[in-house]
Image (spheres, rainbow, N blue to C red):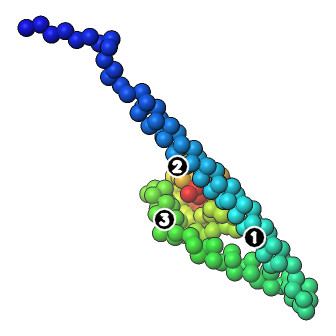
Amino acid sequence: MRFTINLATRTYLDHRVLNMLAYCVIAVLLVMAGWNVSRVSSNMGEQSRMSAEIAAIQSRFESKPGGISETDFSRQKARIRFYNEIIERKSLNWLKQLETFENATPEGISLSSLSQGKDQGEWKLEGRARTFKSLQQYLERLEASESFSNILLLSHQKLTLGENMHGVQFTISCKVVN
């Protein structure tokens, strides 16, 4: 039994169907591209309209309303700024900040005061150390930590508490990196 197949006379692919399918796919892609272009242009128009509205509203808030004196208006703006600063400070995650300081503080160092500066992330640390060497190691540990930057020893002084109790009182300013 011998099989012979003549491949030259037989058409295995129907090119008309393939061409029709390709044209349909191209037409669908062109329709989708046109729809996406119209969406993008519509969104850009909406964005420019919203920007104009935002600018109009901001200019309305920045200008003084009629019937109010300039001193009252400036006093009210100062009050608003003050309360916004309070709200911003209250939004700080205190537990995370305290944990950051606790993890960085070694044995032999006790912090007596932590106060936040006016700038974002700025802190002032006051405390006591057993020796100046332990204070120096604390500063090196803060500088090596990725959580702190701009570490500066503001002041230090020797403490004598009784005959055999000595220590160092210090003040450090630093910036906590979030």
State the SS at label 2: loop
Q: Which residue is mark 3?
A: 96
What residue did someone put label 1 on? 54
User: Of the residues shown, which amino acid type is indicated by label 1?
Assistant: Ile
Pointer 2: what residue? 145
Earlier-in-chain disc, 2 versus 3: 3
Crowdedness near tag 1: few (<14), some (14–19) or many (≥20) residues, C-alpha within 10 Å: few
Q: Amino acid at mark 2?
A: Ser
Residue 22 in the image: state x and y as whole percent.
47, 35
Q: Residues within 10 Å of mark 2 (few under 14, many from 20)?
A: few
**Front position in the image: 176 or 171:** 176
Q: Secondary structure at mark 1?
A: helix
Instruction: Determine the residue positioned at 75% across, 66% down.
Output: 49
Label 3 vs 1, first from the N-terminus: 1
Q: Is residue 42 visible in this depiction of the protein? A: yes
Q: Callout 3: few (<14), some (14-19), or many (20+) C-alpha neighbours within 10 Å?
A: few
Q: Is residue 74 above or below residue 167?
A: below
